[in-house]
Amino acid sequence: MPRIIVTFLLALAVYPVWASPEVISAHAVALRGTPKYQPDFQNFDYVNPDAPKGGTLRLHSIGTFDNFNRFAQRGDAATASDQLYDTLFVTSDDEIGVYYPLIAEKVDFADDYSFVTFSLNPDARFQDQTPITADDVKFTFEKFSTEGVVQFKRYYSFVKDVEVLSRHQVKFSLEGANKEQMLSLFTLTILPQHYWESRNFKEPLKEIPIGSSGITVKDYKFGQYIIYEHLDNYWAKDLPVNKGRNNFKYIRYDYYRDAIVAFEAFKSGEFDFWQESEAKNWATAYDFPAFTDKKVLKEQLPHSIPQRTDGFIFNSKRPQFSDQRVREALAYMIDFEWMNKALFYNQYTRTESYFTNTEFAATGLPDDDELEILTPLKGKIPEQVFTKEFKLPTTKGDGNIRNNMRQALRLLKSAGWELKDRKLVNSKTGKPFEFELLSYRPLTERIAAPFKSNLAKIGITLNLRQVDSTQFINRVREHDFDMVSFRYSANPYPSSSLKIIWRSDFVDSTWNIANVTDPAIDALIDGINTHQENPRKLQAYGRALDRTLLWNFYIIPQWHLSAFRIAYWDKFSRPESRPLYSLGIDTWWQNNKKPGADQ
Protein backbone atom coordinates (compact mmCIF):
# COMPACT_ATOMS: atom_id res chain seq x y z
CA MET A 1 0.00 0.00 0.00
CA PRO A 2 1.46 3.39 -0.94
CA ARG A 3 2.98 5.21 2.02
CA ILE A 4 0.81 8.31 1.51
CA ILE A 5 -2.37 6.24 1.86
CA VAL A 6 -1.07 4.48 4.96
CA THR A 7 -0.16 7.83 6.51
CA PHE A 8 -3.61 9.21 5.69
CA LEU A 9 -5.38 6.23 7.24
CA LEU A 10 -3.25 6.46 10.37
CA ALA A 11 -4.13 10.14 10.65
CA LEU A 12 -7.79 9.30 10.45
CA ALA A 13 -7.35 6.72 13.19
CA VAL A 14 -5.89 9.40 15.46
CA TYR A 15 -8.33 12.12 14.40
CA PRO A 16 -11.65 10.37 13.64
CA VAL A 17 -13.27 13.36 11.95
CA TRP A 18 -16.08 11.26 10.56
CA ALA A 19 -17.13 9.79 13.93
CA SER A 20 -20.70 10.40 14.95
CA PRO A 21 -21.34 11.92 18.37
CA GLU A 22 -22.36 9.62 21.17
CA VAL A 23 -26.10 9.65 21.84
CA ILE A 24 -27.16 9.86 25.48
CA SER A 25 -30.62 8.65 26.55
CA ALA A 26 -31.95 9.89 29.87
CA HIS A 27 -35.05 10.20 32.03
CA ALA A 28 -33.56 13.26 33.71
CA VAL A 29 -30.66 15.59 32.94
CA ALA A 30 -28.53 17.75 35.23
CA LEU A 31 -26.63 20.79 34.09
CA ARG A 32 -23.89 19.79 36.53
CA GLY A 33 -23.36 16.53 38.34
CA THR A 34 -26.08 13.89 38.34
CA PRO A 35 -29.81 14.04 39.11
CA LYS A 36 -30.78 13.34 42.69
CA TYR A 37 -33.83 11.27 41.72
CA GLN A 38 -33.50 7.94 39.94
CA PRO A 39 -35.73 6.80 37.04
CA ASP A 40 -38.04 4.88 39.36
CA PHE A 41 -38.59 7.73 41.84
CA GLN A 42 -42.17 8.13 43.04
CA ASN A 43 -42.20 11.74 44.24
CA PHE A 44 -39.95 14.59 45.31
CA ASP A 45 -38.64 14.37 48.88
CA TYR A 46 -40.20 17.67 49.92
CA VAL A 47 -43.83 16.68 49.28
CA ASN A 48 -46.42 14.60 51.09
CA PRO A 49 -47.52 12.17 48.37
CA ASP A 50 -50.67 11.40 50.36
CA ALA A 51 -51.68 15.03 50.85
CA PRO A 52 -55.47 15.43 50.63
CA LYS A 53 -56.94 17.37 47.72
CA GLY A 54 -59.59 20.06 47.84
CA GLY A 55 -60.39 23.46 49.26
CA THR A 56 -59.50 26.95 48.09
CA LEU A 57 -56.25 28.86 48.51
CA ARG A 58 -57.06 32.56 48.43
CA LEU A 59 -54.20 34.86 47.42
CA HIS A 60 -53.87 38.44 46.21
CA SER A 61 -52.26 40.47 43.46
CA ILE A 62 -51.49 44.17 43.14
CA GLY A 63 -52.61 46.18 40.11
CA THR A 64 -54.93 44.93 37.42
CA PHE A 65 -55.24 42.49 34.52
CA ASP A 66 -56.99 42.58 31.16
CA ASN A 67 -56.11 39.34 29.38
CA PHE A 68 -54.97 35.71 29.70
CA ASN A 69 -51.99 35.73 27.34
CA ARG A 70 -48.86 35.85 29.48
CA PHE A 71 -46.77 36.16 26.32
CA ALA A 72 -48.59 39.12 24.75
CA GLN A 73 -46.45 42.15 23.99
CA ARG A 74 -48.95 44.58 25.43
CA GLY A 75 -51.57 44.60 28.16
CA ASP A 76 -51.50 43.16 31.68
CA ALA A 77 -51.75 39.38 31.82
CA ALA A 78 -53.48 37.73 34.77
CA THR A 79 -51.30 36.68 37.66
CA ALA A 80 -50.15 33.03 37.27
CA SER A 81 -51.53 32.82 33.71
CA ASP A 82 -48.24 31.21 32.65
CA GLN A 83 -49.35 28.18 34.68
CA LEU A 84 -52.03 27.40 32.09
CA TYR A 85 -49.31 25.59 30.13
CA ASP A 86 -46.96 22.73 30.94
CA THR A 87 -43.39 22.30 29.73
CA LEU A 88 -41.53 19.33 28.28
CA PHE A 89 -39.56 18.81 31.48
CA VAL A 90 -39.79 20.44 34.91
CA THR A 91 -37.14 21.28 37.51
CA SER A 92 -37.13 20.12 41.11
CA ASP A 93 -37.00 22.65 43.95
CA ASP A 94 -34.23 20.94 45.91
CA GLU A 95 -31.67 21.00 43.09
CA ILE A 96 -30.38 23.65 40.69
CA GLY A 97 -30.52 22.94 36.99
CA VAL A 98 -31.93 19.41 37.06
CA TYR A 99 -34.80 18.47 34.73
CA TYR A 100 -37.39 15.69 35.09
CA PRO A 101 -40.05 14.44 32.63
CA LEU A 102 -43.46 16.04 32.29
CA ILE A 103 -44.90 16.25 28.76
CA ALA A 104 -41.81 14.45 27.49
CA GLU A 105 -41.12 11.04 29.00
CA LYS A 106 -37.47 10.81 27.95
CA VAL A 107 -34.82 12.57 25.93
CA ASP A 108 -31.95 11.59 23.63
CA PHE A 109 -29.17 14.05 22.86
CA ALA A 110 -25.75 14.13 21.28
CA ASP A 111 -22.79 14.47 23.60
CA ASP A 112 -21.63 17.43 21.49
CA TYR A 113 -25.13 18.97 21.79
CA SER A 114 -25.65 19.00 18.05
CA PHE A 115 -29.19 17.68 18.49
CA VAL A 116 -31.77 16.80 21.10
CA THR A 117 -34.78 14.54 20.56
CA PHE A 118 -37.76 14.60 22.89
CA SER A 119 -40.01 11.55 23.17
CA LEU A 120 -43.43 12.67 24.35
CA ASN A 121 -45.57 10.76 26.79
CA PRO A 122 -48.31 9.10 24.68
CA ASP A 123 -50.81 9.90 27.46
CA ALA A 124 -50.14 13.66 27.30
CA ARG A 125 -53.28 15.67 26.63
CA PHE A 126 -54.35 19.29 26.31
CA GLN A 127 -57.22 20.48 28.48
CA ASP A 128 -59.78 19.60 25.80
CA GLN A 129 -58.34 16.05 25.81
CA THR A 130 -56.69 16.48 22.41
CA PRO A 131 -53.38 14.55 22.36
CA ILE A 132 -50.17 16.56 22.64
CA THR A 133 -48.02 15.61 19.67
CA ALA A 134 -44.64 16.41 18.17
CA ASP A 135 -46.42 18.76 15.75
CA ASP A 136 -47.54 20.86 18.72
CA VAL A 137 -43.94 21.11 19.96
CA LYS A 138 -42.68 22.20 16.55
CA PHE A 139 -45.56 24.66 16.20
CA THR A 140 -44.87 26.10 19.67
CA PHE A 141 -41.22 26.79 18.95
CA GLU A 142 -42.05 28.42 15.64
CA LYS A 143 -44.87 30.46 17.18
CA PHE A 144 -42.55 31.86 19.84
CA SER A 145 -39.90 32.52 17.19
CA THR A 146 -42.16 34.42 14.81
CA GLU A 147 -44.68 36.10 17.12
CA GLY A 148 -43.03 36.07 20.54
CA VAL A 149 -40.70 38.69 21.94
CA VAL A 150 -37.74 39.35 19.67
CA GLN A 151 -35.21 38.09 22.22
CA PHE A 152 -36.65 34.56 21.97
CA LYS A 153 -35.58 34.22 18.36
CA ARG A 154 -32.20 35.80 19.08
CA TYR A 155 -31.49 33.59 22.07
CA TYR A 156 -32.47 30.42 20.21
CA SER A 157 -30.49 31.27 17.08
CA PHE A 158 -28.52 28.07 17.74
CA VAL A 159 -31.62 26.03 16.79
CA LYS A 160 -31.20 25.33 13.08
CA ASP A 161 -34.12 22.98 12.48
CA VAL A 162 -37.09 21.41 14.24
CA GLU A 163 -38.12 18.08 12.74
CA VAL A 164 -41.12 15.90 13.54
CA LEU A 165 -39.82 12.32 13.50
CA SER A 166 -43.08 10.66 14.49
CA ARG A 167 -46.31 11.45 16.30
CA HIS A 168 -44.49 11.52 19.63
CA GLN A 169 -40.90 12.37 18.68
CA VAL A 170 -39.47 15.77 17.78
CA LYS A 171 -35.83 16.57 17.03
CA PHE A 172 -34.09 19.93 17.47
CA SER A 173 -30.90 20.26 15.39
CA LEU A 174 -28.46 22.64 17.07
CA GLU A 175 -25.35 24.48 15.94
CA GLY A 176 -22.72 25.78 18.32
CA ALA A 177 -24.85 25.07 21.39
CA ASN A 178 -23.59 24.15 24.82
CA LYS A 179 -25.32 21.99 27.41
CA GLU A 180 -26.94 24.92 29.19
CA GLN A 181 -28.43 26.22 25.94
CA MET A 182 -29.70 22.78 25.01
CA LEU A 183 -31.30 22.41 28.44
CA SER A 184 -33.19 25.67 27.99
CA LEU A 185 -35.34 23.81 25.45
CA PHE A 186 -36.43 21.40 28.17
CA THR A 187 -38.67 24.06 29.71
CA LEU A 188 -40.30 25.10 26.45
CA THR A 189 -43.94 25.96 27.18
CA ILE A 190 -46.15 23.81 24.94
CA LEU A 191 -49.11 25.40 23.15
CA PRO A 192 -51.99 23.63 21.39
CA GLN A 193 -51.61 24.19 17.68
CA HIS A 194 -55.32 23.71 17.02
CA TYR A 195 -56.07 26.67 19.29
CA TRP A 196 -53.21 29.11 18.62
CA GLU A 197 -52.60 28.67 14.89
CA SER A 198 -55.47 31.04 14.06
CA ARG A 199 -54.61 33.60 16.77
CA ASN A 200 -51.98 36.33 16.99
CA PHE A 201 -49.62 35.40 19.81
CA LYS A 202 -48.48 39.01 20.23
CA GLU A 203 -51.93 40.26 21.14
CA PRO A 204 -53.81 40.16 24.47
CA LEU A 205 -56.34 37.35 24.82
CA LYS A 206 -59.76 38.08 26.27
CA GLU A 207 -61.09 34.51 26.29
CA ILE A 208 -59.97 31.58 28.42
CA PRO A 209 -57.49 29.61 26.30
CA ILE A 210 -57.07 25.85 25.97
CA GLY A 211 -54.01 25.03 28.03
CA SER A 212 -51.63 22.11 28.39
CA SER A 213 -51.45 22.01 32.19
CA GLY A 214 -53.79 20.81 34.92
CA ILE A 215 -54.95 24.37 35.68
CA THR A 216 -57.63 26.36 33.91
CA VAL A 217 -59.59 29.53 34.63
CA LYS A 218 -62.82 28.77 36.49
CA ASP A 219 -64.12 32.32 36.90
CA TYR A 220 -62.87 35.88 36.60
CA LYS A 221 -63.72 39.54 36.38
CA PHE A 222 -61.08 41.61 34.63
CA GLY A 223 -59.24 43.83 37.05
CA GLN A 224 -60.95 42.35 40.12
CA TYR A 225 -60.35 38.61 40.58
CA ILE A 226 -59.43 35.37 38.87
CA ILE A 227 -60.11 31.82 40.08
CA TYR A 228 -58.03 28.90 38.80
CA GLU A 229 -59.23 25.31 39.01
CA HIS A 230 -57.13 22.16 39.20
CA LEU A 231 -58.68 19.73 36.75
CA ASP A 232 -59.69 16.27 37.95
CA ASN A 233 -59.01 14.76 34.51
CA TYR A 234 -55.48 16.14 34.24
CA TRP A 235 -53.49 13.34 32.64
CA ALA A 236 -50.26 14.06 34.56
CA LYS A 237 -51.60 14.54 38.08
CA ASP A 238 -50.05 11.27 39.29
CA LEU A 239 -46.67 11.64 37.60
CA PRO A 240 -43.76 11.67 40.08
CA VAL A 241 -43.07 15.36 39.43
CA ASN A 242 -46.67 16.29 40.37
CA LYS A 243 -47.48 13.86 43.17
CA GLY A 244 -48.10 15.70 46.43
CA ARG A 245 -48.26 19.09 44.69
CA ASN A 246 -51.10 21.35 43.56
CA ASN A 247 -53.35 20.12 46.34
CA PHE A 248 -55.98 22.88 46.32
CA LYS A 249 -58.99 22.49 44.07
CA TYR A 250 -59.17 26.24 43.52
CA ILE A 251 -56.69 29.11 43.74
CA ARG A 252 -58.21 32.58 43.82
CA TYR A 253 -56.37 35.88 43.29
CA ASP A 254 -58.12 39.06 44.35
CA TYR A 255 -56.71 42.28 42.94
CA TYR A 256 -56.01 45.34 45.07
CA ARG A 257 -54.90 48.85 44.27
CA ASP A 258 -51.84 48.74 46.51
CA ALA A 259 -50.21 46.69 49.26
CA ILE A 260 -51.64 48.81 52.08
CA VAL A 261 -55.21 48.05 51.06
CA ALA A 262 -54.31 44.40 50.43
CA PHE A 263 -52.84 43.94 53.90
CA GLU A 264 -55.99 45.31 55.50
CA ALA A 265 -57.97 42.80 53.46
CA PHE A 266 -55.69 39.99 54.64
CA LYS A 267 -56.16 40.99 58.28
CA SER A 268 -59.92 40.82 57.88
CA GLY A 269 -59.79 37.37 56.31
CA GLU A 270 -60.45 38.28 52.68
CA PHE A 271 -57.57 36.03 51.63
CA ASP A 272 -55.35 33.43 53.30
CA PHE A 273 -51.64 34.01 52.80
CA TRP A 274 -49.31 36.99 53.05
CA GLN A 275 -45.59 37.15 52.31
CA GLU A 276 -44.30 40.26 54.02
CA SER A 277 -42.02 42.56 52.03
CA GLU A 278 -41.93 45.51 54.42
CA ALA A 279 -39.79 45.37 57.54
CA LYS A 280 -41.87 47.92 59.42
CA ASN A 281 -45.01 45.85 58.98
CA TRP A 282 -43.22 42.70 60.14
CA ALA A 283 -42.09 44.47 63.30
CA THR A 284 -45.22 46.47 64.16
CA ALA A 285 -48.32 45.57 62.15
CA TYR A 286 -49.19 42.13 63.50
CA ASP A 287 -51.32 43.17 66.43
CA PHE A 288 -54.76 42.70 64.89
CA PRO A 289 -57.44 40.52 66.55
CA ALA A 290 -57.04 37.45 64.33
CA PHE A 291 -53.31 37.31 65.09
CA THR A 292 -53.85 37.86 68.83
CA ASP A 293 -56.43 35.05 68.80
CA LYS A 294 -53.95 32.79 66.93
CA LYS A 295 -56.21 32.49 63.92
CA VAL A 296 -53.37 33.97 61.90
CA LEU A 297 -49.87 32.51 62.27
CA LYS A 298 -46.60 34.31 61.58
CA GLU A 299 -43.24 32.70 60.73
CA GLN A 300 -39.79 33.72 59.57
CA LEU A 301 -38.14 30.84 57.71
CA PRO A 302 -34.38 31.27 57.06
CA HIS A 303 -32.94 30.03 53.78
CA SER A 304 -29.81 30.29 51.66
CA ILE A 305 -31.55 30.66 48.31
CA PRO A 306 -29.76 32.78 45.67
CA GLN A 307 -31.21 36.27 45.96
CA ARG A 308 -32.48 38.68 43.35
CA THR A 309 -30.74 42.06 43.08
CA ASP A 310 -33.07 44.92 43.95
CA GLY A 311 -31.95 48.47 43.50
CA PHE A 312 -32.28 51.91 42.00
CA ILE A 313 -31.54 51.17 38.34
CA PHE A 314 -30.12 53.88 36.08
CA ASN A 315 -31.05 54.31 32.45
CA SER A 316 -27.40 54.47 31.42
CA LYS A 317 -28.26 56.20 28.13
CA ARG A 318 -29.73 59.26 29.84
CA PRO A 319 -27.20 62.13 29.48
CA GLN A 320 -26.87 62.70 33.22
CA PHE A 321 -26.23 58.99 33.85
CA SER A 322 -23.97 58.07 30.92
CA ASP A 323 -20.83 58.64 33.04
CA GLN A 324 -19.91 55.89 35.50
CA ARG A 325 -18.53 58.49 37.93
CA VAL A 326 -21.95 60.13 38.23
CA ARG A 327 -23.64 56.81 38.93
CA GLU A 328 -21.03 55.98 41.56
CA ALA A 329 -21.42 59.42 43.12
CA LEU A 330 -25.13 58.89 43.66
CA ALA A 331 -24.41 55.61 45.45
CA TYR A 332 -22.73 57.67 48.19
CA MET A 333 -26.05 59.37 48.87
CA ILE A 334 -27.84 56.22 50.07
CA ASP A 335 -27.56 56.04 53.86
CA PHE A 336 -28.41 52.37 54.25
CA GLU A 337 -27.18 52.10 57.83
CA TRP A 338 -29.57 54.85 58.95
CA MET A 339 -32.43 53.44 56.85
CA ASN A 340 -31.89 49.92 58.18
CA LYS A 341 -32.11 51.20 61.74
CA ALA A 342 -34.85 53.82 61.32
CA LEU A 343 -37.05 52.20 58.67
CA PHE A 344 -36.23 48.49 58.51
CA TYR A 345 -35.69 47.52 62.18
CA ASN A 346 -32.21 46.23 61.32
CA GLN A 347 -33.66 43.30 59.39
CA TYR A 348 -31.75 43.65 56.12
CA THR A 349 -28.30 43.00 54.69
CA ARG A 350 -26.91 45.22 51.95
CA THR A 351 -26.78 43.51 48.57
CA GLU A 352 -23.29 43.61 47.04
CA SER A 353 -23.47 41.02 44.28
CA TYR A 354 -25.60 39.88 41.36
CA PHE A 355 -24.96 36.31 42.62
CA THR A 356 -25.88 36.62 46.30
CA ASN A 357 -25.71 33.32 48.23
CA THR A 358 -23.69 31.57 45.51
CA GLU A 359 -20.04 30.71 44.84
CA PHE A 360 -20.07 33.16 41.92
CA ALA A 361 -20.26 36.32 44.04
CA ALA A 362 -17.09 38.38 43.63
CA THR A 363 -15.05 38.85 46.81
CA GLY A 364 -11.72 40.49 47.50
CA LEU A 365 -9.53 41.34 44.51
CA PRO A 366 -9.54 39.31 41.29
CA ASP A 367 -7.60 36.03 41.52
CA ASP A 368 -5.30 34.76 38.79
CA ASP A 369 -8.13 33.06 36.87
CA GLU A 370 -10.12 36.28 36.85
CA LEU A 371 -7.12 38.42 35.92
CA GLU A 372 -6.54 36.23 32.88
CA ILE A 373 -10.03 37.26 31.75
CA LEU A 374 -10.01 40.87 32.93
CA THR A 375 -6.52 42.04 31.93
CA PRO A 376 -7.28 42.16 28.17
CA LEU A 377 -10.22 44.44 29.06
CA LYS A 378 -8.05 46.94 30.94
CA GLY A 379 -8.95 50.48 29.94
CA LYS A 380 -12.42 49.35 28.89
CA ILE A 381 -13.74 48.63 32.39
CA PRO A 382 -13.51 50.66 35.61
CA GLU A 383 -9.98 50.69 37.03
CA GLN A 384 -11.35 49.84 40.49
CA VAL A 385 -12.06 46.31 39.22
CA PHE A 386 -8.31 45.65 39.54
CA THR A 387 -7.44 47.73 42.58
CA LYS A 388 -10.30 47.64 45.10
CA GLU A 389 -12.69 45.10 46.55
CA PHE A 390 -16.23 46.19 45.78
CA LYS A 391 -17.91 47.58 48.86
CA LEU A 392 -20.79 50.02 48.86
CA PRO A 393 -20.30 53.31 50.73
CA THR A 394 -21.22 53.11 54.40
CA THR A 395 -22.11 55.57 57.15
CA LYS A 396 -22.27 55.56 60.95
CA GLY A 397 -26.07 55.36 60.75
CA ASP A 398 -26.57 58.64 62.63
CA GLY A 399 -27.85 60.61 59.65
CA ASN A 400 -24.57 62.50 59.19
CA ILE A 401 -23.30 61.78 55.68
CA ARG A 402 -20.84 64.67 55.21
CA ASN A 403 -17.93 62.40 54.30
CA ASN A 404 -20.06 60.66 51.69
CA MET A 405 -21.25 64.01 50.35
CA ARG A 406 -17.65 65.12 49.85
CA GLN A 407 -16.83 61.92 47.97
CA ALA A 408 -19.92 62.31 45.81
CA LEU A 409 -19.12 65.94 44.95
CA ARG A 410 -15.53 65.00 44.12
CA LEU A 411 -16.74 62.40 41.62
CA LEU A 412 -19.36 64.73 40.19
CA LYS A 413 -16.81 67.49 39.70
CA SER A 414 -14.52 65.14 37.81
CA ALA A 415 -17.48 64.25 35.59
CA GLY A 416 -18.21 67.91 34.74
CA TRP A 417 -20.69 69.04 37.40
CA GLU A 418 -20.31 71.87 39.90
CA LEU A 419 -22.24 73.60 42.67
CA LYS A 420 -23.62 77.06 41.89
CA ASP A 421 -26.07 78.81 44.20
CA ARG A 422 -26.67 75.51 46.00
CA LYS A 423 -27.64 73.81 42.76
CA LEU A 424 -25.55 71.20 40.97
CA VAL A 425 -25.20 72.25 37.34
CA ASN A 426 -23.37 71.02 34.28
CA SER A 427 -20.12 72.97 33.91
CA LYS A 428 -20.55 73.35 30.14
CA THR A 429 -24.29 73.83 29.69
CA GLY A 430 -25.31 75.29 33.04
CA LYS A 431 -28.22 72.83 33.10
CA PRO A 432 -29.20 71.77 36.63
CA PHE A 433 -28.96 68.11 37.67
CA GLU A 434 -32.53 66.87 37.88
CA PHE A 435 -34.04 63.45 37.26
CA GLU A 436 -37.15 61.35 37.83
CA LEU A 437 -37.57 58.11 39.76
CA LEU A 438 -40.41 56.16 38.17
CA SER A 439 -42.41 53.76 40.33
CA TYR A 440 -45.77 52.03 40.61
CA ARG A 441 -45.74 51.20 44.33
CA PRO A 442 -46.27 53.58 47.27
CA LEU A 443 -43.52 51.68 49.13
CA THR A 444 -40.97 52.98 46.61
CA GLU A 445 -41.68 56.56 47.62
CA ARG A 446 -41.10 55.67 51.27
CA ILE A 447 -37.67 54.16 50.69
CA ALA A 448 -36.74 56.86 48.15
CA ALA A 449 -37.60 59.78 50.43
CA PRO A 450 -34.28 59.69 52.39
CA PHE A 451 -32.40 59.37 49.09
CA LYS A 452 -34.24 62.41 47.73
CA SER A 453 -33.46 64.40 50.86
CA ASN A 454 -29.76 63.52 50.74
CA LEU A 455 -29.48 64.41 47.06
CA ALA A 456 -30.99 67.81 47.76
CA LYS A 457 -28.06 68.49 50.11
CA ILE A 458 -25.68 68.42 47.15
CA GLY A 459 -27.98 70.36 44.84
CA ILE A 460 -29.61 67.49 42.92
CA THR A 461 -33.37 67.44 42.39
CA LEU A 462 -35.04 64.02 42.47
CA ASN A 463 -38.68 63.95 41.38
CA LEU A 464 -40.75 60.95 42.44
CA ARG A 465 -43.35 59.90 39.88
CA GLN A 466 -45.83 57.12 40.55
CA VAL A 467 -47.82 55.62 37.67
CA ASP A 468 -50.09 52.59 37.34
CA SER A 469 -48.52 49.20 36.68
CA THR A 470 -49.46 49.17 32.98
CA GLN A 471 -47.81 52.50 32.29
CA PHE A 472 -44.80 51.48 34.35
CA ILE A 473 -44.30 48.25 32.37
CA ASN A 474 -44.66 50.04 29.04
CA ARG A 475 -42.20 52.77 29.98
CA VAL A 476 -39.64 50.28 31.24
CA ARG A 477 -39.96 48.28 28.03
CA GLU A 478 -39.33 51.43 25.99
CA HIS A 479 -36.52 52.69 28.28
CA ASP A 480 -38.62 55.80 28.86
CA PHE A 481 -37.31 56.63 32.33
CA ASP A 482 -34.34 58.12 34.17
CA MET A 483 -34.32 55.71 37.12
CA VAL A 484 -36.56 52.94 38.42
CA SER A 485 -36.62 51.00 41.65
CA PHE A 486 -36.73 47.48 40.25
CA ARG A 487 -34.89 44.19 40.30
CA TYR A 488 -32.79 41.62 38.47
CA SER A 489 -33.77 38.00 38.92
CA ALA A 490 -31.73 35.72 41.14
CA ASN A 491 -28.81 33.98 39.45
CA PRO A 492 -27.98 30.57 40.91
CA TYR A 493 -25.14 30.42 38.38
CA PRO A 494 -23.97 32.52 35.40
CA SER A 495 -26.21 31.21 32.63
CA SER A 496 -26.24 32.03 28.94
CA SER A 497 -29.57 33.79 29.50
CA LEU A 498 -27.59 36.67 31.02
CA LYS A 499 -27.08 37.85 27.44
CA ILE A 500 -30.75 38.91 27.38
CA ILE A 501 -30.12 41.19 30.35
CA TRP A 502 -26.70 42.61 29.51
CA ARG A 503 -25.51 41.96 25.95
CA SER A 504 -25.55 44.84 23.43
CA ASP A 505 -27.58 43.06 20.78
CA PHE A 506 -30.35 42.51 23.34
CA VAL A 507 -30.61 46.17 24.29
CA ASP A 508 -34.24 46.24 23.18
CA SER A 509 -34.94 43.33 25.52
CA THR A 510 -37.54 43.90 28.20
CA TRP A 511 -34.95 42.71 30.73
CA ASN A 512 -32.06 44.99 29.71
CA ILE A 513 -33.42 47.55 32.12
CA ALA A 514 -30.22 49.59 32.50
CA ASN A 515 -30.01 50.06 28.71
CA VAL A 516 -26.46 48.70 28.58
CA THR A 517 -24.39 48.42 25.40
CA ASP A 518 -20.79 47.75 26.42
CA PRO A 519 -18.32 45.66 24.34
CA ALA A 520 -16.39 44.67 27.49
CA ILE A 521 -19.51 43.26 29.12
CA ASP A 522 -20.38 41.56 25.83
CA ALA A 523 -17.01 39.79 25.98
CA LEU A 524 -17.63 38.60 29.55
CA ILE A 525 -21.12 37.35 28.61
CA ASP A 526 -19.65 35.51 25.62
CA GLY A 527 -17.11 33.86 27.93
CA ILE A 528 -19.88 32.73 30.25
CA ASN A 529 -21.74 31.30 27.28
CA THR A 530 -18.64 29.45 26.03
CA HIS A 531 -17.59 27.94 29.37
CA GLN A 532 -20.85 26.56 30.71
CA GLU A 533 -19.29 23.12 31.17
CA ASN A 534 -15.98 24.24 32.65
CA PRO A 535 -16.66 24.87 36.36
CA ARG A 536 -13.38 26.66 37.05
CA LYS A 537 -13.68 28.96 34.05
CA LEU A 538 -17.36 29.60 34.66
CA GLN A 539 -16.68 30.62 38.24
CA ALA A 540 -13.93 32.99 37.08
CA TYR A 541 -16.12 34.51 34.38
CA GLY A 542 -19.07 34.82 36.76
CA ARG A 543 -17.01 36.65 39.37
CA ALA A 544 -15.35 38.80 36.72
CA LEU A 545 -18.76 39.82 35.36
CA ASP A 546 -20.09 40.43 38.86
CA ARG A 547 -17.32 42.85 39.87
CA THR A 548 -17.39 44.59 36.46
CA LEU A 549 -21.13 45.20 36.64
CA LEU A 550 -20.88 46.36 40.25
CA TRP A 551 -18.09 48.87 39.57
CA ASN A 552 -20.01 50.22 36.56
CA PHE A 553 -22.83 51.15 38.98
CA TYR A 554 -25.65 50.46 36.56
CA ILE A 555 -27.62 50.00 39.74
CA ILE A 556 -27.40 51.27 43.29
CA PRO A 557 -28.00 47.94 45.06
CA GLN A 558 -30.55 47.96 47.84
CA TRP A 559 -30.85 45.15 50.40
CA HIS A 560 -32.07 41.62 50.94
CA LEU A 561 -33.25 39.20 53.60
CA SER A 562 -32.32 35.52 53.38
CA ALA A 563 -35.56 34.38 54.95
CA PHE A 564 -39.23 34.05 54.10
CA ARG A 565 -41.50 36.23 56.24
CA ILE A 566 -44.95 34.71 55.99
CA ALA A 567 -48.30 35.01 57.73
CA TYR A 568 -51.34 32.85 57.00
CA TRP A 569 -54.74 31.93 58.33
CA ASP A 570 -54.50 28.70 60.32
CA LYS A 571 -56.22 26.37 57.89
CA PHE A 572 -53.25 24.63 56.28
CA SER A 573 -50.77 21.82 56.77
CA ARG A 574 -47.49 21.31 54.96
CA PRO A 575 -44.77 18.65 54.61
CA GLU A 576 -42.11 18.33 57.30
CA SER A 577 -39.35 19.11 54.78
CA ARG A 578 -39.23 22.33 52.80
CA PRO A 579 -37.48 22.38 49.42
CA LEU A 580 -34.02 23.93 49.48
CA TYR A 581 -34.73 26.53 46.81
CA SER A 582 -38.38 27.44 47.29
CA LEU A 583 -40.96 28.29 49.93
CA GLY A 584 -42.93 25.32 48.58
CA ILE A 585 -46.47 26.65 49.00
CA ASP A 586 -47.50 24.40 46.10
CA THR A 587 -46.97 21.45 48.49
CA TRP A 588 -49.35 22.76 51.19
CA TRP A 589 -52.87 21.45 51.62
CA GLN A 590 -56.05 22.38 53.42
CA ASN A 591 -56.41 20.73 56.83
CA ASN A 592 -60.11 20.09 57.29
CA LYS A 593 -59.65 19.53 61.03
CA LYS A 594 -58.75 23.19 61.53
CA PRO A 595 -61.63 25.59 62.24
CA GLY A 596 -60.69 28.01 59.44
CA ALA A 597 -60.78 25.39 56.68
CA ASP A 598 -63.32 25.64 53.88
CA GLN A 599 -65.98 23.00 54.30
Image (tube, rainbow, N blue to C red):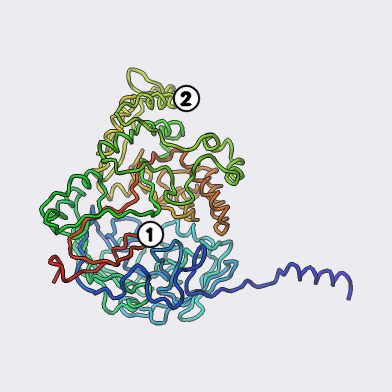
Q: Residue at x 29, y 62 (%)?
A: 80
**Label 2 belongs to which residue?**
414
Is 22 drawn above or below residue 456 in the view shown? below
Task: Indicate the quadrant containing the C terminus: top left, top right, bottom left or bottom right.
Answer: bottom left
Categorize mark 1 by other alpha carbons within 10 Å: few (<14), some (14-19), many (20+).
some
Q: Nearer the viewer, residue 371 or 156?
A: 371
Image coordinates of residue 94 in percent, x first then y, are 40, 63
Q: Which labelled disc corresponds to residue 241? A: none
> Disc 1 and disc 2: Cα gap in Å?
44 Å
Categorize mark 2 by other alpha carbons within 10 Å: few (<14), some (14-19), many (20+).
few
How many labels were placed on the picture?
2
Q: Residue at x 84, y 69 (%)?
A: 7
370 horizontally vs 88: left or right: right
**Label 1 belongs to which residue?**
581
Image coordinates of residue 67 in percent, x first then y, are 27, 61
Q: Nearer the viewer, residue 283 or 521?
A: 283
Type of amino acid at the residue the image marks with label 1: Tyr
Task: Indicate the quadrant containing the N terminus: top left, top right, bottom left or bottom right.
Answer: bottom right
Q: Residue at x 14, y 57 (%)?
A: 294
